[in-house]
Amino acid sequence: MAQTLDPTTRLYRACNPNESLEPTDDRYVNCDEVRGAHVVEAFERCLRLADPEKPEVKPFAGHRGVGKTSELYRLRASLERPPSAQKPSSFQVVYFDVSQALDVNDLDFPDLLVCTVAEVQRQLRDANIEGFDPVTTYLQRLWDDVKQTLGTKVLLKEAKVAVPFGDLTAEIKNRPDARAQLREAVNLRSTDLLEAVNDLLTVARVKLLERGKDGLVLIIDGLDKMVRRELKDGKTTTHDRLFLDRADQLASLNAHTIYTVPISLFYSPRTAQVEHAFGEHNVPVSMINLRGPGRSDPTPETAGMKVMGKMIEARCRHAGVKVGDAFDAPETAHYLCAMTGGHPRHLMMFLRSSLGAIESLPITRKAAETAVRNYANSLLREIPDAYWEKLRAFAKPSEDMPSDELHQEMLYLLHVFEYMNGRPWYEVNPVIRTLPKYGAGS
């Protein structure tokens, strides 16, 4: 980072809450020990044990901002390198984030299918797999069929022959006025398109095995960012439509596949459909546990609080700032860590908001409290009246989380946090505790 910038600017830029970190980034901190489960290690172990002829399909869940993408980067890096000198093989990984290519405010299965076809074509072509030709007659014919189905209703620009579905992905994202017609055209060919991409995946897997690799893994990220809203029937949501109604199709790709999914999905009465289709009992990436033994209140000495402190240290080190110079007192840093409830992105957001409230370092307690109050005010504006009584039930750690729509929404919107230590428990977002309206009913 450029040392010509002042320390406040350097630290602000080092704390980008929307930047996912590779495991090689000096700001990355491994949080497995304080999450209560080693999810990445378990995923890697299962994929290495699995038969490449019988693909594994796994949902990867956790609260928004808990660090799922960074953990998937770590999983990708682990899969792409040999596990030991005795076993020098590795996987070919196709990773992509659908939120970069599609509109997560309005996403459906046809969009995801087209995006997957495009990325598989592009990335396997770029990998120069010997004997693999992504330009198949089958896919070209399907592309021609899609254009013919649309006719004059939606005119598509001429696509590159190598990856026509990549251009269709862009059309779906950038032309909301024509999205329904585009989806209908893809839906009519969805079975054929699945067969075509599975042919590609099968050929690629065979070639990779011939190269001495362990096979192919698809990591499809960004689906957890899908906006959750009710559909016109008033009975289902956009999450139900993709992850539940299409679970069997999501599980039908001919490669080991990992999908990020919203944590609220695991609390749907229909979750068994996902587990039946994917063959997986799910362990989410949990919040960092800030409490001590017996779930006592967070103190600077608890393991989780120490890990949050390491996150601050890593950002300061990256920015070339001493931790002692960044805060007016250690208690200010501890306060911010505690108010996150163990949510890594919130820590970065609080740090940035605090830095925006001062002329220069150090971050003062007043600036830190302003940052927390700004977030509290935004929560006050967004929480519906019907939620408050339900939220008060999580004032103390609770092992009970009802599976109704309201509680799913509270998890998705980060009003209630999930933690893990052998079994899950739930607590209200600590910033909500600061709101007078929260205490009004106690």
Image: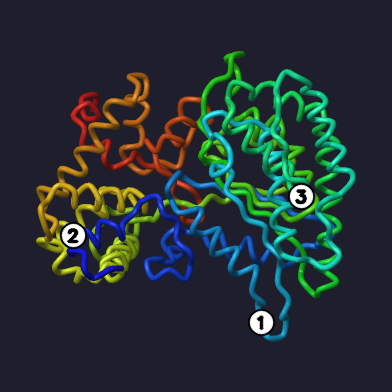
Residue 438 x, y percent position in the rendering: 25, 29
Could you say which quadrant of the image residue 78 lies in?
bottom right
Q: Amino acid at mark 3?
A: Ala
- Mark 1 or mark 3: whose residue is earlier in sequence: 1
> What secondary structure is found at the residue carrying circle 3?
loop
> Which residue does the image show at 64% across and 74% down from the upper left?
81
Q: Is residue 4 visible?
A: yes
Q: Amino acid at mark 2?
A: Thr
- Mark 2 or mark 3: whose residue is earlier in sequence: 2
Question: Label 3 crowding class (10 Å Cα cut-off): few <14, some 14-19, many 20+?
Answer: some
Q: Is residue 276 visible?
A: no
Residue 115 x, y percent position in the rendering: 67, 42
- Mark 1 or mark 2: whose residue is earlier in sequence: 2
Q: Which image quadrant: the N terminus?
A: bottom left
Task: Return the residue nearer the eye: 423 or 268.
Answer: 268
> Which residue does the image show at 20% across and 25% down from the upper left?
440
* Residue identified by numbered label 2: 8
* Residue identified by numbered label 3: 162
Residue 289 x, y percent position in the rendering: 38, 55
